[in-house]
Structures are given as structure tokens and as C-alpha cells.
């Protein structure tokens, strides 16, 4: 069966992905999919794996067959009575599904916090926010290696966000000494590590039966 998909909503903060499945001559189907990882490969795999759900629904729609034909007059087409499949009654989630959804929510909260950024202030008291996404983590590791090999120039610029006295954020290119860059690299590492520690603790509590466990509480407690 030929079909197409459209991703209409991506929400790492809520661990949700919304996809519309389309096929010619059939109604559009909207699917909300819980998701813990939002890299391209995972999204593509999940979207494709749920296509079977859409195909099954469309097949059930086409399964309506005529069970009675009655002649209604000369030259008048026969009327037909159709039997439609019984509607699918949504079933309440199982305990396992509820647990999986809560674990995914904890993971999604960890991701949102991880990429939130790291706040750092220089010796003059100026405040900056540095990206802490996985891509930025890789760049920091590369810069640290360049310092170790002696190929990074002292005072090289780094793109970040600058925060003024009113709390407004603007794009900035901050000149960083080796020592300053090392401080930021350490801060990013510690921030990411804290995120994973909080996710680990919250997940373990949830698996142990504590349904009140959540990422934010554990992160704040570390």
C-alpha cells in the first residue's frame, strides 16, 4: 500500500511526536507517538514502524462488504446494505505501557534540561550562555584537544549568548582565554553528567514503585 507521512509536531519536552499518515482515497490518520530520542534515524524508524497501524486501519475500512441487494425498480440501481467492522474501542493502557510512558517522560525532561545551555560569567561579571547540545559538546571536546596539542590560539572567539543587565539575550562572539574555555568545558560536562544522574535516580525510583518520581526534583536535589 502506498502512503505518505507528514510530521506535524515534534516536542522533545513532552516526549511526543505527531505524524499524519495519508493514502489516496483514504482518510488521513493522525498518530501521537511517545518518543525518548529525537535524532533523525530514530524518528524515521518510529514513523515507519507505525505505518502498519495506519495500513491495518485502512484495511478494516475497506473490509465493509455488501450483505444484501434489493431491486428498487426498472432502470434504478440496486440499493445495498453494508456491514461495517465494529469500531475499535480504545483500551486503557496496561501498567507496562504506563510505566514506559513515564520513563519516556523522564528521558524527555532530561533531554530538555541537557540542551538548555550553561550560564557562565567572566572576570568582569558579564554573563554568557553557552550551548550544551550534543553537537556543542563535540565542539568543546575538539577545542580542548586543540588546546592540549597547542594549536588553538589564545583568545579565540566562541559563539554564545550574552545576557545584559535587564536579562535580554543577544548573540555574541566571546573571546576566550585557554583558562576560560577550560572552565566552560568543565561546566558543560558537569551539567550534562548531572542530567544523566538525575535521570538515572528518577528512573530507578519509578521502577521501584515510586510513581511520584520525576526528573526535575532529582536534578534540583543534586
Image (cartoon, grey):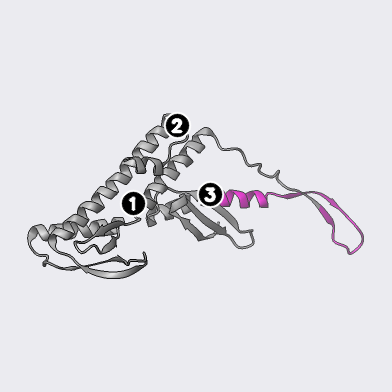
For the C terminus, the image quarter is: top left
For the N terminus, the image quarter is: bottom right
**N-term-proximal mark, 1 vs 2:** 1
Nearest to the eye among marks 2 and 3: give it. Answer: 2
Q: Are marks 2 and 3 in contact (CB under 8 Å)?
A: no
Quadrant of the rendered image containing residue 125 = bottom left
Residue carrying label 3: 52
Residue 126, image x and y in percent?
25, 64
207 w.r.t. 214: above or below: above
Q: Is residue 75 magenta?
A: yes
Near mark 3 (Cα within 10 A), the count class, few <14, some 14-19 or many ≥20, is few
**25 and 210: which one is in front?**
210
Residue 210, label in figure = 2
Residue carrying label 1: 114
Span shown in magenta: 52-80
Per the model, the C-alpha gap separating discs 2 and 3 is 35 Å
Amino acid at each position: 500500500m502506498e502512503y505518505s507521512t507528514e510530521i506535524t509536531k515534534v516536542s522533545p519536552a513532552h516526549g511526543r511526536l505527531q505524524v499524519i499518515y495519508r493514502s489516496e482515497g483514504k482518510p488521513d490518520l493522525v498518530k501521537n507517538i511517545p518518543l525518548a530520542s529525537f535524532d533523525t534515524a530514530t524518528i524515521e524508524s518510529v514513523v515507519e514502524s507505525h505505518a502498519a497501524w495506519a495500513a491495518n486501519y485502512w484495511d478494516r475500512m475497506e473490509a465493509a462488504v455488501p450483505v444484501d441487494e434489493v431491486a428498487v425498480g426498472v432502470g434504478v440501481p440496486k440499493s445495498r446494505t453494508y456491514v461495517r467492522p465494529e469500531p475499535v474501542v480504545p483500551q486503557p493502557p496496561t501498567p507496562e505501557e504506563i510505566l514506559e510512558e513515564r520513563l519516556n517522560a523522564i528521558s524527555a525532561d532530561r533531554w530538555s534540561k541537557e540542551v538548555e545551555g550553561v550560564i557562565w560569567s567572566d572576570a568582569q561579571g558579564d554573563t554568557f550562555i553557552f550551548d550544551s547540545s550534543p553537537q556543542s559538546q563535540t565542539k568543546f571536546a575538539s577545542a580542548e584537544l586543540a588546546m592540549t596539542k597547542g594549536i588553538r590560539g589564545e583568545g579565540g572567539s566562541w559563539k554564545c549568548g550574552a545576557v545584559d543587565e535587564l536579562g535580554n539575550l543577544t548573540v555574541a562572539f566571546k573571546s576566550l582565554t585557554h583558562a576560560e574555555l577550560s572552565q566552560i568545558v568543565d561546566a558543560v560536562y558537569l551539567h550534562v553528567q548531572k542530567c544523566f544522574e538525575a535521570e538515572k535516580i528518577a528512573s530507578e525510583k519509578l521502577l521501584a514503585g515510586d510513581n511520584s518520581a520525576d526528573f526535575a526534583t532529582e536534578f534540583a536535589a543534586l
